[in-house]
Every structure is written in C-alpha cells, then in structure tokens.
Image: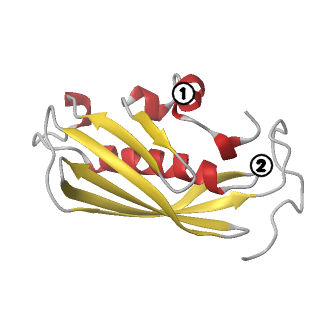
Amino acid sequence: MADLSQVKPEDIREFAVGSFPADLGIEPLEIEDEHARGRIIVESRHLHPGGFVHGGAWTAFGDSVAAWATFRALPPNHDFTTIELKLNVFAAAALGDELICRARPLHVGRSTAVIEAEIYKGEKRVANLIVTQFVLPGRDPRAERPAPGDYPPGD
C-alpha cells in the first residue's frame, strides 16, 4: 500500500500479519485523521518476572498505535521510522487487563512528526509516550532504499 494517508484498521490487520506488533496481540480499533486507537489484552508474554507489564510491552504498544496515527498525517508516498520516544508509566497493569491506547499528532513537519500516545486502563490513564518519527519524504515505496538526496534538511 503506497498511500498510507487513508489507512484503516482492516488494512493494518492485513499487512501487519507476522509483524512484531501483530505477534504481541496489538489490535487496531480506529484510525482517523486526528487520532488512532488500539488495544491489547495483557497476557503472560507481556509481563516481567514480577507479574506486571514489561516496559518493552508498554513501549511496543504505544509506538505501534503512534505509527498508525503517523500514517494518516503523512503525504502520499512518504514513510517514517521512530527515532526517539519517551515513556512514562503511572500505574501497573497485570494479566487480563485491557489497555487502550489513543495516539494523536502534536506536530507534523517535513522531516519529523511528534505523536502523543496515551494508554488507559478503563477510565484511568496509566501511561504516556511521546514519539518522534523521522519522515522519509518523496521516495518510491517500491525502492529498496531511498535515493541520495531524498531527505530534505530540517523542518
């Protein structure tokens, strides 16, 4: 799918099969221009040895939903990759908990996008991520790698 600006949850379900987020059980619920929402039901594979959700699972969940919000914020034939993220967890989550993430763009420029991903357990916000994406503009999505000069400097 070259144009991800109109991606829908069913598209994610289809092209994400066998990927890291899909293998973790991260489910797309809603993808709109203003936000994306996803869900994960905590299983034993998401826990650290103490029985609570591992930091890597929180991060993978928030980063994945942030990616879906990024798709809708980019012009056609652009791509991106996460270059930085900051996670704060405010409350523990454990086996069987349902977590919902809502991600929205805070900034979308020529070379970066910043997405905020809020994770909830019920009505309570339990984690927050700020994700910075490196925007890869104007490349042919079929190319193995971008051509020299595809990356404009700065915003």
Please state if 23 lies on the left or on the right of 12 as rendered.
Answer: left
Q: Earlier in the sequence, mark 1 or mark 2?
A: 1
Closer to us: 120 or 150: 120
The image position of residue 105, as x and y in percent, is 52, 63
Q: Position of residue 90 (x, y in %)?
A: 18, 62
Q: Give the residue number, with chain letter if any, for mark 1.
A: 10
Q: Is residue 12 left or right of residue 135?
A: left
Relative placement, left or right, of 85 versus 119 is: right
**Image coords of residue 98 (percent x, y):** 22, 37
**Amino acid bearing label 1:** Glu
Q: Position of residue 93 (x, y in %)?
A: 16, 45
Seen in the picture, residue 72 relative to 49 is either above or below; the reply is below
Residue at 60% x, 26% y: name it.
15
* Amino acid at pointer 2: Pro
Residue 76 marker:
2
Q: Quadrant of the C terminus?
A: bottom right
